[in-house]
């Protein structure tokens, strides 16, 4: 729904078409092959935040935009992890509606094991203005501590999103990364919150 988010061409505005086309062209370039596993890691619609910067304020239309965008991806397995309620909740979970339309499992967080590698994915993570992956190290430590306390083998890899930047951190026990965003950095988030780093991609 955002002017600056990933949107199929039929929703592009005349004023920002060249910018919106660039993000869609990137999306087409990376969705022309089949992947083994794809995780759509939350905030699949913009919701009612920053309505002045929306192509579509109606969340039903935002769901349609998301479904049409995600249909482009070819994979053997798909998963949806729910994002922040500020973007994706209302009378219900709009991401669960997207998941239902695409027939993809949807959950607040995800545990997978692929070829012996345990993975934990969650959308929300804390932020930090400190560089060098401070927020990731906190998330890694927290996940190990929580899992060991519950008698669960901790993951080898954690995936987080939410902060619109790509970072990697690791030690001898665990690796973590935050994903970049599929929203260009011209929104209120990119302009006024001054993130330490802003990345677009997957």
Image (cartoon, rainbow, N blue to C red):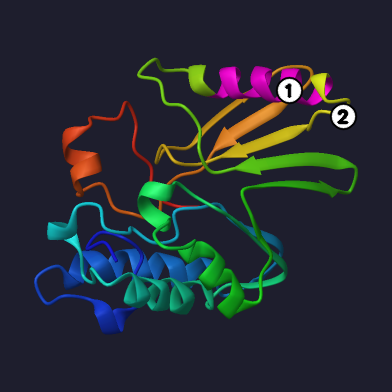
Nearer to us: label 2 or label 1: 1
- Is residue 147 in the magenta section? yes
| Snapshot quadrant of residue 173 | top right
Q: Earlier in the sequence, mark 2 or mark 1?
A: 1
> Magenta segment range?
136-148
- Indicate whether 17 appears above or below 112: below
Q: Is residue 159 left or right of residue 112?
A: left
Give the residue at mark 1.
Answer: 146
Determine the residue positioned at 41% across, 63% down: 91
Q: Which mark is residue 131?
A: none
Give the x, y percent position of residue 28.
Answer: 46, 73
| Snapshot quadrant of residue 31 | bottom right
Give the x, y percent position of residue 10.
Answer: 28, 84
- Indicate whether 51 appears above or below 141: below
| Snapshot quadrant of residue 175 | top right
Q: Is residue 123 left or right of residue 65?
A: right
The number of numbered discs placed on residues in the rendered structure image is 2
Determine the residue positioned at 21% across, 70% down: 55
Determine the residue positioned at 20% across, 49% down: 187
Q: Residues within 10 Å of mark 2 (few under 14, many from 20)?
A: few
Q: CA distance from mark 2 to mark 1?
A: 10 Å
Give the residue at mark 2.
Answer: 153
- Is residue 57 in the magenta section? no
Give the x, y percent position of residue 18.
Answer: 19, 70
Determine the residue positioned at 62% across, 39% down: 159
Q: Main secondary structure of the magenta part?
A: helix
Q: Quadrant of the N terminus?
A: bottom left
Residue furthest bottom in the image: 10
């Amino acid at each position: 729904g955002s002017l600056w988010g990933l949107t199929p061409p039929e929703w592009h505005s005349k004023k920002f078409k060249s910018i919106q086309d660039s993000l869609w062209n990137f999306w087409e370039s990376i969705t022309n092959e089949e992947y083994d596993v794809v995780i759509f890691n939350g905030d699949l619609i913009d919701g009612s935040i920053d309505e002045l910067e929306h192509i579509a304020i109606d969340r039903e239309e935002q769901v349609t935009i998301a479904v049409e965008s995600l249909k482009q991806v070819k994979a053997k397995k798909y998963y949806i992890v729910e994002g922040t309620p500020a973007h994706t909740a209302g009378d219900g979970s709009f991401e669960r509606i997207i998941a239902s339309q695409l027939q993809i499992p949807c959950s607040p967080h995800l545990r997978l094991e692929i070829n012996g590698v345990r993975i934990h994915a969650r959308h929300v993570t804390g932020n930090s203005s400190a560089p060098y992956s401070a927020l990731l190290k906190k998330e890694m430590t927290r996940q190990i501590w929580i899992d060991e306390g519950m008698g669960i083998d901790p993951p080898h890899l954690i995936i987080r999103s939410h902060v619109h930047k790509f970072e990697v951190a690791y030690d001898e026990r665990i690796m973590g990364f935050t994903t970049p965003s599929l929203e260009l950095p011209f929104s209120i988030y990119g302009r006024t919150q001054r993130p330490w780093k802003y990345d677009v991609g997957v």
